[in-house]
Amino acid sequence: MRRVLIADDEANMRWVLERALSKAGYDVETVENGQLALKRALAERPDLVLLDLKMPKMDGLSVLRALKEHYLDLMIVMMTAHGSTATAVEAIKAGAHDYLMKPFDIEELLITVSKAFEVESLREQVNYLKGESQSDGWQLVGNSDAMQAVKHLVERVSHTPATVLIQGESGTGKELVAHAIHTLSSRVNGPYIRVNCAALTENLLESELFGHEKGAFTGAHARKTGRFELADGGSLFLDEIGELSFNVQAKLLRVLQERTFERVGGEKTIKVDVRIIAATNRDLLKEAQEGRFREDLYYRLSVFPISIPPLRERREDIPSLAEHFLKNLRTYGQNKTFGPGVIDQLTRYDWPGNVRELENVVERLVIISQAAVIGTDGLPVFKTSSKEVEVSGAFVLPPEGVSLEELEKSFLQQAMEQTGGNQSQAAKRLGLSRHAFLYRLEKYGIDPHWGI
Ligand SMILES: Nc1ncnc2c1ncn2[C@@H]1O[C@H](COP(=O)(O)OP(=O)(O)OP(=O)(O)O)[C@@H](O)[C@H]1O
Ligand SMILES: [Mg+2]
C-alpha cells in the first residue's frame, strides 16, 4: 500500500484529507507541523508527502528543501492558499512535483495524487530500463553545467572515429567517460581493450601494445597478439598516457598516423581499424611544452579533447553522486538513507580524491552506520580550507586510547622519515620553527640525526 504523509496545521483539513485518501486505498499518516513532518519522513520514507505551505515551527518550503536533500526523488505535493502562486512556483523550482491551490475539492486531490504516482512509476520504469541498457555501468551521474557539457561531448564524439583525449584529476571519472564513448559508438559490439601505460615497463608495454613474434626476445616463447590487434574493430583505451616513454611515444605516433605497426621482432606490417581513447591526469600540453611529451603526439591525441573538472568545481553534482552510490549499495541489501546534514557536509568538502573518494566515503558510511538513517557522526571531520586539504584529505579522530602526545610523536617521526631526516624540511612540513621542532624531538626522545 502506498504511504502518504500529510502535514497541515488545520485539524479539519487533516481529517478531510485523511478520510478521502484512506478511502481511495492509501496508507495515510497526518501530522500538524513541519518539524513533525520532517521527523516522520526521515524515520520512514513515505511514497508521497502532502505539505501545507504555511505551518508553525517549520514552513512547507523548508520541509520540502530538507526532504529533497535526503530523498532526491520523493514525490511532494504542496498545498497553498489561494493567491500565493509565487510561492507555489518557488516550491516547484525547489523540487515539488505539483501543487494544489486551496480550496480544492476531493476529486482534484485524488487526481493530483494518483497522477503523481503514475509519474513515479513511469520514472521507475525508465530508471529500470536505463539500468538495463547501462548494465555495464557507465552511467554518468551529475547534472552540473560542467557535467552536462561533458555528456554532450561524449555523445557527439562517440558517433565519429576521432581520437579522444580525456583529461582530469585522479578520480574524476576519466575511465567511465572512455567506456561511455565506446558504448555509445557504432563499435559497441566490437572489443573494448584497456591498457594502463603506467603499469608496465617500457619493453613489456611495447610488446603488450603491438605484440611480439616468437623468439623476439628472451622469454618470448610464443607469438603474442598485442592490444592494438585485439582491439581491431573496437576501441583501445590508453590509460595514463602521460607515462609513456619517448620510444613508445614515437611508435604510437606512427600508429595514429598510418594505422599500421609491426609486432616486436616481426617484419609484417599489420593494419588495424581502432578508435583510440587516451586519458591522463597530467596537463599534457604543459608536458609537451616542457619537453616531457612529444608535441606531435599530443596534437594527434587531442583531436577531440574532453576535460573533466574536479568535483570541488561542480559541487552541485555531489548530492546526486552520493545518492547514486548509496543506491548502488542497496543491491547488497544495505537499505540506508542519508540523515539530516549529511549531504550538506559532503557538499562542503573539497574532495581532493574527487568522485572516487566520495564513493569510498559513502561506502564507509553505509558500513559503519548502525541505523537505517545515516547520521553525521560517522563522517570524517572534513576540513574545507584548501590549505588544510593540501596537508591531508580528511582528519579523523584517532582510535580510542591513542593520546594527542602519541599522535604528535608519530607526526614528528613521519616528517623525519618523509624528508629523509632533513630537519628544516621536516619542521616546515609540520609548520614549526626549527627551534620548536628540535625542542619537540628532544621531548619525545627522537634522534635528531635520524637517517644520517
Ligand atoms: N559522473 C559519474 N557518475 C557515476 N560514477 C562516477 C562518475 N565519475 C566517476 N565515477 C566513479 O568514480 C570512480 C572513479 O572514476 P574513474 O576510475 O573513471 O576515474 P579516473 O578519472 O579514471 O581516475 P584515475 O585518474 O585515478 O584513474 C569509479 O568508480 C567511477 O565509476
Ligand atoms: Mg582511471
Image (cartoon, rainbow, N blue to C red):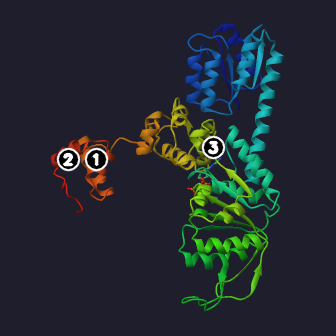
Cβ at disc 3 under 8 Å from ligand 1: yes
What's the distance in space between the residues labelled 1 and 3, CA to CA? Answer: 43 Å
> Which quadrant would residue 337 be assigned to in this image?
top right
Comes first in the chain, label 1 or label 2: 1
Q: Residue at x 67, y 78 (%)?
A: 210
Rendered view: 385 above or below 89: below
Find residue 31 and report its horizontal and vertical position in percent: 61, 16
Q: Are marks 1 and 2 in contact (CB under 8 Å)?
A: yes
Residue 84 appears left or right of 218 = right
Find residue 373 and report its horizontal and vertical position in percent: 52, 35
Find residue 451 and report its horizontal and vertical position in percent: 24, 62
- Mark 2 closeness class: few <14, some 14–19, many ≥20 residues within 10 Å: some
Q: Secondary structure at mark 1?
A: helix
What's the distance in space between the residues labelled 3 and 2, CA to CA? Answer: 49 Å
The residue that mark 3 highlights is: 324
Q: Secondary structure at mark 2?
A: helix
**Towards the viewer: 335 or 215:** 215
Instruction: Name the mark nearer the viewer: 3 or 2.
Output: 2
Comes first in the chain, label 3 or label 2: 3
Q: Say what amino acid the circle numbered 2 marks.
A: Leu
Q: Say what amino acid the circle numbered 3 marks.
A: His
The residue that mark 1 highlights is: 427
**Residue 243 showing in the rendered view:** yes
**Residue 380 showing in the rendered view:** no
Find residue 316 and report its horizontal and vertical position in percent: 63, 35
Q: Which mark is residue 438?
A: 2
Q: Which quadrant, please, contains the N terminus?
A: top right
> Which quadrant would residue 196 be assigned to in this image?
bottom right
Rendered view: 59 above or below 382: above
Q: Which quadrant, please, contains the C terminus?
A: bottom left
Q: Residue at x 28, y 47 (%)?
A: 427
